[in-house]
Each structure stands twice: as C-alpha cells, then as structure tokens.
Image (tube, rainbow, N blue to C red):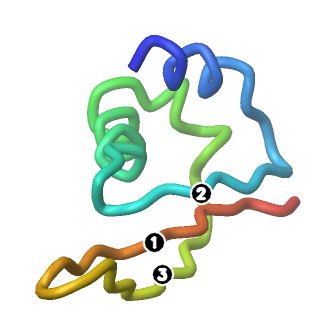
C-alpha cells in the first residue's frame, strides 16, 4: 500500500493506471474526491475501460484501465 501511495503522489496527467477489482485504486480516488478535493483535482475527469476476466472455474474479476489524457 505504501508503494501505491508513493506512486499516486507523483502521478500527474497524462497517466494510465492498470488495476482490477482486487485493487482499491478506484476506492482511493473516491476517497480523495470526498475527503481531499485539492489532491483529487489532478485525477478528476479520468476515464475507465473495464474488462470482465475469468481465471478458472468460478473465479471472475474485472480488469480496469484508468486513464486521463489532457
């Protein structure tokens, strides 16, 4: 988690971030929007492309590409 927070601290548009439902990246952006709007501004207006994926018998998750190109 610390590595993720360090990475986010340096991210500025344009950016591409890959995550999945196993990641809390989207939850973190929601947290920033609600609790730290000044820090959220650089991420506002991001786009998401999602793909449903299957790993095996009954194991499903969603891959996400989160991006913002200015």
**Of the residues under marks 1 and 3, which one precedes in the sequence?**
3
Q: Circle 3 — which element?
A: strand
Q: On the rendered structure, is 24 left or right of 16?
A: left
The correct choice, above or below, for 8 with respect to 15 in the image is above
Identify which residue, 4 or 70, lies in the foreground: 4
The correct choice, above or below, for 29 with respect to 65 in the image is above
The outermost residue toward the left is 58
The mark closer to the camera, 1 or 3, is: 1
The reply to whether discs 2 and 3 touch (Cβ–Cβ < 8 Å) is no
The reply to whether discs 2 and 1 touch (Cβ–Cβ < 8 Å) is yes
Q: Which part of the image, by quadrant, shows the C terminus?
A: bottom right
Look at mark 3 in the image and give the residue it sits on: 50
* Residue 32 location (% of width, % of height): 39, 33
Q: Residue at x 38, y 84 (%)?
A: 53
Residues packed near mark 1 inside 10 Å, few (<14), some (14 to 19) or many (20 plus): some
* Residue 52 location (% of width, % of height): 37, 87
Look at mark 2 in the image and give the residue it sits on: 18
Q: Circle 1 — which element?
A: strand
The reply to whether discs 1 and 3 touch (Cβ–Cβ < 8 Å) is yes
**Of the residues under marks 2 and 1, which one precedes in the sequence?**
2
- C-alpha span from label 2 to label 3: 10 Å
Look at mark 1 in the image and give the residue it sits on: 63
């Amino acid at each position: 988690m610390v590595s993720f927070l360090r990475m986010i601290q340096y991210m500025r548009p344009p950016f591409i971030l890959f995550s999945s439902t196993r990641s809390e990246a989207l939850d973190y952006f929601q947290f920033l929007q609600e609790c730290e709007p000044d820090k959220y501004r650089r991420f506002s207006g991001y786009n998401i492309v999602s793909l449903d994926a299957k790993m095996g018998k009954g194991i499903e998750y969603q891959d996400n590409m989160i991006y913002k190109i200015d």
